[in-house]
Image: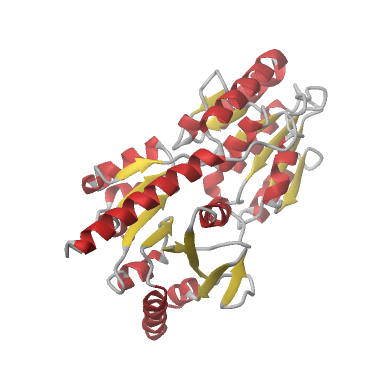
Amino acid sequence: MMRVLFWSNLFWPYIGGAEYFGAKLVLALRKRGYEFIVLTSHDYLDLPDKTDYGGIPVHRLPFLQTLRDRDATRFIEICQKVKKLKRNFKPALVHLNGISSTTVFYLRTRDVEPATSLVRINQELLPNQRREYETIFTQTLLSVGWAACVSSTVLKQASQLVPEIEGRSSVIYNGLEDPPFPPAPLSFETPCLLCVGRLVPAKGFDLALAAVAMIIEKFPNIRMLIAGDGPERRHLGQRVAQLGLSDIVEFLGLVEPEKVLALINRATLVLVPSRHEGLPTVALQAALMARPVVATRVGGLMEAIIDRETGLLIGSGDSHGLAEAIAFLLSNPHVATKMGMAGRNRAQKRFLWHRCVDAYDALYRKLIGTADAGRSFGLV
């Protein structure tokens, strides 16, 4: 059995795009003959150091708190625990589910029980990452055997920063399982706008609130739902009050992943006004549910949405453009419905879950097979 150490900044039951993706992927690939352990961090939830997820051992260490405390002694102790875990498990592959501050622990321990490695780059590069070469991001790209990017935009950015990954990088789009129920008709009598995601500045939900305030007189029956939680919750609530939208906007808090599709099925339009993105799951989910998407022209959104065919793309930070796009679709139900169906047809061909799993399965086998061949000739 091929052993894989799946390393993730956070892991289920933490809810987020990367966490949800990682949890689904390890379960799917275990069915194909891989033996997994998950190595992740403690954070705000009170979870045991070792637990089980669907039969897969999950090891949690205080990576994040140690970095926050700048505790050098504890940092060394945790590195020793990682080394012991790797020696005991002897992975054939280390799969990094994203790059974060906690990746420094991987970099400090990667020479212990050396294994071929893979990183999934799930976010658009930040401006400082594109300029600065000596970062955790670049060190990770230089060290791994392969970089799998969630969009062509992300791959291009990573390759421009670290040209050395050419020939050992590729795009693997996120995928989703086909919904268990059909899309409901779009409602225009009481239009519902939906935003889903962590409440952080990068998601641009403040822009969505500003846009709604601009069109409320034209569409007095409009409603807006915001699903998610995060540090911007209080600020966004204050902004709702300032804009006089308290009767219009409802904060739903965290919504369990398995309930998101049903929520999207209630929406007329899905808004993704992000300031930067990788390939957001909600854009793909909206497409599968035949919902037109209004989004910013950033990151993988330009690949998830075909402008004027499956949705509308606007400039980053452009609340006026967002308002105009929403108003256009609400004023043209036939166009909105046509875009939603076009998005569904495209998503069913390009962004299905089995295609994503097949791609990672093939990549795992390629990387492990190459490493095994190298060891047999004394090359690694």
Q: Residue drawn at (60%, 58%), measured in percent from left and top? A: 231
Query: Is 335 or 141 nearer to us in this picture?
Result: 141
123 sits to left or right of 215: left
The N terminus lies in which quarter of the figure?
A: bottom left
Task: Report x, y in % for residue 72.
Answer: 37, 82
Taking 38 as reference, is 47 left or right?
right
2 is higher (above) or lower (below) than 111: above
Q: Is residue 98 above or below residue 46?
A: above
Residue at 48 percent across and 29 percent down: it is: 315
Which quarter of the image is occupied by the C terminus?
Answer: bottom left
Residue 342 at what x, y percent from top left?
A: 60, 20
**Looking at the image, is 336 positioned above or below residue 68?**
above
Colour convention: secondary structure
Q: Is residue 237 left or right of residue 312?
A: right
The answer to whether residue 134 is seen in the rendering is no
Residue found at the very far left of the displayed protein = 378
x and y percent of residue 195 in the render?
66, 40
In this view of the protein, can residue 83 be seen by the observer? yes
Depth check, front residue: 64 or 26: 26
Residue occupying the point 60% across, 51% down: 198
Most foreground residue, 28 or 48: 28
Q: Nearer the viewer, residue 189 or 119?
A: 119
Counting the numbered discs, the total is 0
Q: How far across and how far down the image is residue 374, in percent?
A: 21, 59
